[in-house]
Image (cartoon, rainbow, N blue to C red):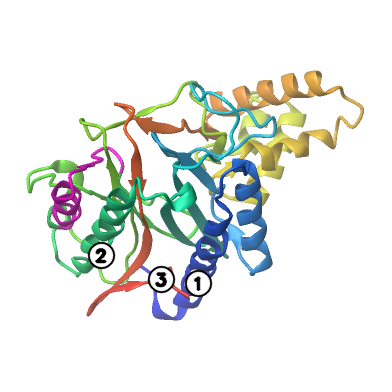
């Protein structure tokens, strides 16, 4: 739980995260490349005194979460055409900011061109988030919070996504154990026991969909998100001593851990680090070295990789998110100006 004297970093991160969303959403326009918006958002965070707590993600139409561009600008598998916004696209922009490891996480959904094709779904996603937050009082069971969010989606004619959850935040830890349902999971669901705790900080993010099952699935391959994370489970010095990793691999691992701690990072952020020891290497050979390095570091559990997520039925997905501090008197939204 977060102590009062520690809250300044969390509130500052929340302000920067919200300002980033509001400052960048207008850039999601027809004809613009996804990477332009992602790069602009990450630069906005830095200019305003924060650090990206995870790579800015863009999820279009049936894509639900966890996709960021890579250094090759390859589109996600199954996506046809270039990664260019088109009029009528339903776009989720998810932004996380940290200040000294204190994390704020927020997201919104917009329709490219504002044509009105997704107005009801966008409104339902935002209202579901707000309905969940209204219930975020100490002692309120998680299943009641989930039911409040899920009912909004159902009433508007959409399905709440059941296998994507909100999550507790701790310093340097984006997913700190507690999960928050966004549907009527029932009081006996073992995955959602307990209730919000005073001093707890939570990311509340209901997703809805036009798909029938209310489920998301992984986009292949297993690293399709282009996002990685240091697990904290493997000490690289011990791995080097035991011969599990070569000296260059250990050096790269230290570079990565020093920069990102245990927060998620983008392949495109870390890949240039490999160019330092191999300045004359051709692009194809450098890529092979990178792939071998990541394979090794994941095999020893130093790194973990993420898959992007999409609706299992091909439905359009909507999402809104705030970061919330639970106080004795109820919820305080941190992702505000």
Check residue 334 in the rendering and tell me which mark sits there, or answer none.
3
Q: Residue at x 18, y 60 (%)?
A: 195
Which residue was labeled with disc 2? 133
313, above or below 34, in the image: above
In this view, which residue lies farthest toward the front?
A: 115
* Residue 219: quadrant of the picture: top left
Residue 169 x/y as whole percent: 39, 58
Q: Earlier in the sequence, mark 1 or mark 3?
A: 1
* Residue 239: quadrant of the picture: top right
- The CA distance from mark 1 to mark 3 is 7 Å
In the rendered structure, the answer to whether residue 71 lies left or right of residue 52 reads right
- Tag 1, which secondary structure? helix
Q: Residue at x 32, y 66 (%)?
A: 200
Q: Earlier in the sequence, mark 3 or mark 2?
A: 2
Please say whether residue 330 is one of the residues in the magenta stretch.
no
- Within 10 Å of disc 1 (Cα), the crowding (few <14, some 14-19, many 20+) is some
- The CA distance from mark 2 to mark 1 is 18 Å
Foreground of the two, 286 or 112: 112
Which residue was labeled with disc 1? 15
In the rendered structure, the answer to whether residue 168 lies left or right of residue 35 reads left
- Tag 3, which secondary structure? loop
Q: Residue at x 55, y 37 (%)?
A: 228
Q: Residue at x 51, y 43 (%)?
A: 58
Quadrant placement of the N terminus: bottom left
Residue 104 x/y as whole percent: 46, 62
Residue 201 x/y as whole percent: 35, 64
């Amino acid at each position: 739980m977060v102590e009062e004297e520690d809250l300044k970093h969390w509130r500052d991160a929340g302000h920067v995260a919200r300002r980033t969303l509001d400052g960048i959403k207008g850039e999601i326009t027809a004809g613009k490349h996804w990477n332009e918006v992602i790069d602009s958002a990450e630069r906005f965070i830095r200019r305003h005194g924060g650090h990206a707590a995870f790579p800015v993600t863009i999820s279009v139409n049936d894509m639900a979460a966890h996709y960021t561009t890579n250094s090759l600008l390859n589109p996600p598998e199954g996506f046809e055409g270039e990664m260019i916004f088109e009029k009528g696209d339903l776009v989720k922009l998810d932004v996380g900011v940290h200040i000294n490891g204190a994390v704020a996480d927020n997201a919104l959904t917009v329709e490219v061109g504002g044509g009105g094709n997704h107005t009801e779904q966008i409104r339902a996603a935002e209202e579901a988030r707000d309905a969940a937050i209204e219930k975020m009082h100490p002692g309120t069971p998680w299943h009641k919070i989930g039911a409040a969010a899920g009912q909004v989606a159902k009433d508007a004619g959409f399905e709440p996504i059941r296998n994507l959850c909100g999550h507790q935040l701790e310093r340097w830890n984006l997913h700190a154990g507690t999960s928050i349902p966004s549907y009527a999971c029932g009081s006996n669901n073992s995955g959602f026991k307990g209730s919000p705790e005073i001093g707890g900080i939570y990311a509340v993010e209901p997703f809805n969909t036009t798909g029938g099952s209310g489920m998301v699935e992984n986009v292949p391959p297993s690293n399709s998100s282009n996002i990685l994370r240091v697990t904290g489970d493997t000490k690289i010095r011990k791995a080097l001593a035991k011969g599990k990793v070569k000296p260059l691999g250990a050096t790269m691992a230290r570079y990565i851990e020093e920069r990102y701690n245990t927060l998620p990072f983008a392949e495109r952020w870390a890949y240039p680090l490999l160019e330092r020891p191999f300045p004359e290497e051709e692009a194809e050979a450098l890529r092979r070295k990178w792939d071998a390095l990541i394979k090794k570091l994941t095999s020893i559990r130093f790194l973990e990789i993420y898959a992007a997520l999409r609706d299992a039925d091909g439905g359009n997905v909507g999402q809104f998110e705030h970061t919330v501090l639970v106080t004795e008197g109820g919820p305080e939204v941190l992702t505000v100006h």
